[in-house]
Image (cartoon, rainbow, N blue to C red):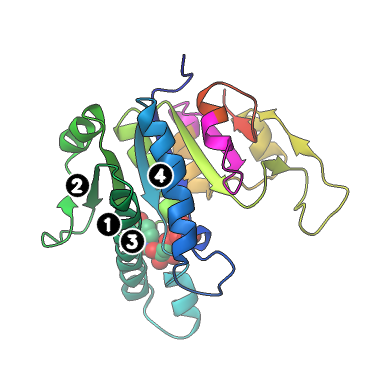
Amino acid sequence: MAKYKRILLKLSGESLMGDQQFGIDFKMLKHYALQVQQLVEKNIEVAIVIGGGNIFRGMQAEKSGMDRVQGDYMGMLATVMNGMALQSALEGIGVFTRLVTAIEMQAIAEPYIRRKAIRHLEKGRVVIFSGGTGSPYFTTDSTAALRANEIDADVILKGTRVDGIYTADPEKDSTATKFDKLSFAKVISLGLSVMDMTAFTLCQENNLPIIVFDINDTQNLMRIIEGEQVGTLVEG
Ligand code: UDP
């Protein structure tokens, strides 16, 4: 029996880069697509929110003198490109998908309509949410929190390079230890960063669990679905 029936997987733009400094590594796309396929074969409903940081970030553009809002829209467009690439990878291995965007672009993606997105999930199609929230000043983590609540997902699975939440950054501090489970309040009191605050509080207020896990381990998604303790669970 699966522990979670409907999941929202958050993939950052950077997770598509692989070893590259920029852009999309097609090996990484295939790697994610194969993992998602395994879930679909087990009748898990999968929604994905894709980031855009591998191509463009509004905040960085602002530092170079660009108007923030303009930069944010460019960042949102970057997520659509990533979404298209991910859709291609999934369809290439026979997984049915729908690419949805918060900014209307009818030639390439469906506009976001909540009921329609839910219907796709019920029919076993993987729904890729692109275009972020459609509004500047937000992030794709906030998009993940928002859409997960809207579609009534059981959990947000935040795939990262590290295998959970640590007392300190394990890539910089060798004494850092990992948490298996944390409450929302504890994350705040310890000053840990799981997602940006807007995203995090949206999950907290609606009691939507978040699991931070290592996406590079190909077994992890399936283990999580089967209820194994993987990564760090934030809930309650
Ligand atoms: N963005 C935005 N509104 C949103 C989502 C994203 O303005 O609702 C912009 C923002 O400039 C952000 C960029 O799109 O820097 C890429 O998204 P994000 O940084 O969240 O991508 P990730 O870090 O997940 O790759």
**Residue at 46 percent of width and 13 percent of height:** 1
Q: To which quarter of the image does residue 107 belong?
A: bottom left
Residue under label 2, please give it: 112
Q: Are marks 3 and 4 in contact (CB under 8 Å)?
A: no
The range drawn in magenta is 204-222
Q: Which one is closest to the eye, mark 3 or mark 2?
A: 3
Density class for disc 4 (Cα within 10 Å; few <14, some 14-19, many ≥20) is: many
Residue under label 3, please give it: 85
Q: Are marks 2 and 1 in contact (CB under 8 Å)?
A: yes
Q: In the rendered structure, which amino acid carries the disc numbered 4?
A: Ala
Q: In the rendered structure, which amino acid carries the disc numbered 1?
A: Gly
Which is more N-terminal, label 4 or label 3?
3
Most extreme residue toward the left is: 106
Query: What x and y, as percent, mark residue 119?
Result: 18, 31
Nearest the viewer among 153 and 30 is 30
Which is more N-terminal, label 1 or label 2?
2
Residue under label 1, please give it: 134
Which is more N-terminal, label 3 or label 1?
3
Which is more N-terminal, label 2 or label 3?
3
Residue under label 4, please give it: 144
158 to 222, vertically: above or below: below
Element carrying mark 1: loop
CA gap between label 1 and label 3 equals 19 Å
Density class for disc 3 (Cα within 10 Å; few <14, some 14-19, many ≥20) is: some
Ligand 1 under 8 Å from disc 1 Cβ: yes
Q: Are marks 1 and 4 in contact (CB under 8 Å)?
A: no
Q: Quadrant of ligand 1?
A: bottom left
- Give the left or right position of residue 142, taking residue 92 as reference: right
- Give the left or right position of residue 134, taking residue 54 as reference: left
